[in-house]
Amino acid sequence: MRLPTVSNLSQLAGVLALLGAAPLLAQGPVVIEHDHLIVESGPFALRITDIVMVKIAGPAALPAGQFHLQAPERAENLRLLTESGQSGPPVVVSGGALVNQIELPPGRHQFQFQYELVDAAPSVRVLLPRNYPTEAIDILLPSGPLAARATGLHGAGSFEVESRRFERLTGSNLPAGRPIDLILERPAPPERRRDPMAIGVMAAVAMMGALLVLRSVWLARRRADGGGRAAAN
C-alpha cells in the first residue's frame, strides 16, 4: 500500500503557527497548544500524521508515565516519527497511546507520530480523543477529492507549502474529554456500467451456443437411429 507523503513536517508546522494563535485556555499541568493533523488518502487506507505541541505548565516536571496522548481506537500501525533526548525518546508507543518514559520538564515539547485507518469506504468516521485541553487544532487535507467535516471545527481556506496546496479545517479552545467526531469523505470508485447492447450481444452468443449444442445432440441421435435401423434390416 503506497500513500503520498508530506516531505517537510517542520516547515508545515511552522507555517501553521503563523496562521494565528488561539486564546489561552485555563492552565493545567498539561495543555495541547497546537495539534496539526495531515490526512492523506490511499485506495484502501487513510494515513494521519499528527504534529502536536504540548506545554507542561510546571513548576515541577511531569513524572514518567503520567503523560498519555491517546490515538483513535481504529488507529493501526501507530508509530513515532521523531526522537529526542540523549537517554532515549521521551515518549514511547504503548497501548495505543504516546506515553512518557522519562520526566517531562516544564516547557514545550513537540511530538510527531503517524497511524493508518484501514478503510476503503467512501465515508470514514473517526473519533479523535482529547486527553488534554487543546488551544488550537488544524486538520489539513491536500487539495483534491478528499473532504472533511468535524464537530466544533470550521473551514479556514487553503494555503500552500512546498508547491502543495492544503485545505484547512480549524478549531480552538477544545475541552479535555470530549472527542472530535471527524468524518472523512472521498469519491467512491467508479462503478462498471453495463452496456445494454453488450449484454444483448452476449445473450445472443450464449443462445447460439446453446442451439449449436442442441443441434449436435439432435444430429448424433439421428445418426444413432439410422445406424440402428440399418442393423435391423
Image (cartoon, rainbow, N blue to C red):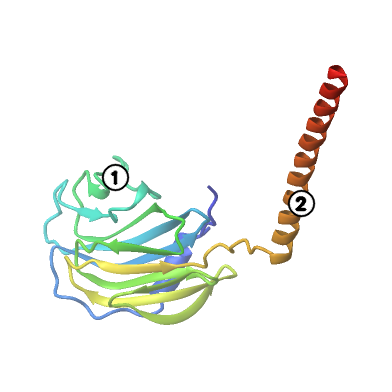
Q: Quadrant of residue 101?
A: top left
From the image, tell me which residue sits under label 2.
205
Asked if the residue at tag 1 contacts the one at tag 2, i.e. Cβ–Cβ closer than 8 Å, the answer is no
Q: CA distance from mark 2 to mark 1?
A: 61 Å
Tell me the element at label 2: helix
Q: Is 55 left, or right, of 44 in this rendering?
A: left
Residue 78 seen in the current view: no
How packed is label 2: few (under 14 Cα within 10 Å), some, or many (20 or more)? Answer: few
Tell me the element at label 1: strand
Q: Is residue 123 above or below residue 231?
A: below
Residue 95: give x, y in percent of width and height: 24, 44
Q: Amino acid at mark 1?
A: Val
Residue 107: give x, y in percent of width and height: 23, 62
Q: Residue at x 73, y 65 (%)?
A: 197
Q: Amino acid at mark 2?
A: Val
Residue 41: give x, y in percent of width and height: 49, 60
Q: Quadrant of residue 155?
A: bottom left
Q: Is residue 111 above or below residue 211?
A: below
Q: Quadrant of residue 181?
A: bottom left
Q: Which mark is residue 93?
A: 1
Name the quarter where the C terminus is drawn: top right
Q: Nearer the viewer, residue 15 or 135?
A: 135
Residue depth check, mark 2 versus mark 1: number of the one nearer the observer: 2
